[in-house]
Amino acid sequence: MENLYLIRKIEVVTAHFFGETTSETPNTFTTQEFSAEKLHEIAEQQLSQVKDMLQKFYSNVKFSKLVVKLTYSPKNTPELEHCIDLGFDEEGEVYCS
């Protein structure tokens, strides 16, 4: 049987010449269960959407950091939290699961 996971929250961390900002995005996935592969797909989709939005509204701003952090828990042990970090920072590409 495949392990299923619940998404707890999705955060976006950015850094630019104004400073660093962390914001939580609306979690529209609260009642759904996902496989590990689907969690990674969702993290990639969220990163793509954030990049598109930032390019549209802040095209003049150069971001030195853009990381989407997806926090999730196993369905059977919701007290355990894990995360997927995806994006880039000053040192290059970020991927942590």
Image (cartoon, helix red, strand yellow):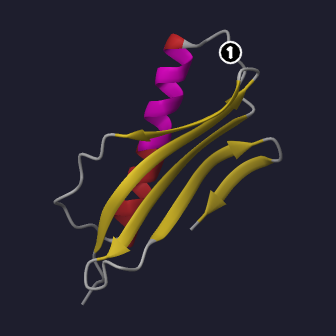
Quadrant that contains the C terminus: bottom right
Residue 11 is situated, as x and y percent measured from the top left of the image, at 47, 46
Q: Is-magenta flag for residue 65?
A: no
| Residues drawn in magenta | 46-56
Q: Residue at x 26, y 78 (%)?
A: 75
Q: Is-magenta flag for residue 50?
A: yes
Image height of 72 relative to 47, above or below: below
Q: Farthest bottom residue?
A: 1
User: In the figure, is residue 82 to the left or right of 19?
Assistant: left
Mark 1 secondary-structure assignment: loop
How many numbered discs, if any?
A: 1
Q: Farthest top residue?
A: 60
Quarter residue 81 falls in:
bottom left
Image height of 54 relative to 75, above or below: above
Q: Residue at x 75, y 32 (%)?
A: 64
Image height of 63 relative to 43, above or below: above
User: In the figure, is residue 27 to the left or right of 63?
Assistant: left
Q: Residue at x 30, y 82 (%)?
A: 3
Q: Farthest left residue?
A: 31
What amino acid type should be assigned to the residue bearing mark 1?
Answer: Val
Residue holding disc 1: 61
Front residue of 3/17: it is: 17
Q: Residues within 10 Å of mark 1 (few under 14, many from 20)?
A: few
Front residue of 77/89: it is: 77
Residue 42 is situated, as x and y percent measured from the top left of the image, at 38, 52
Q: Main secondary structure of the magenta part?
A: helix
Residue 65 is situated, as x and y percent measured from the top left of the image, at 70, 37
Q: Residue at x 28, y 76 (%)?
A: 4
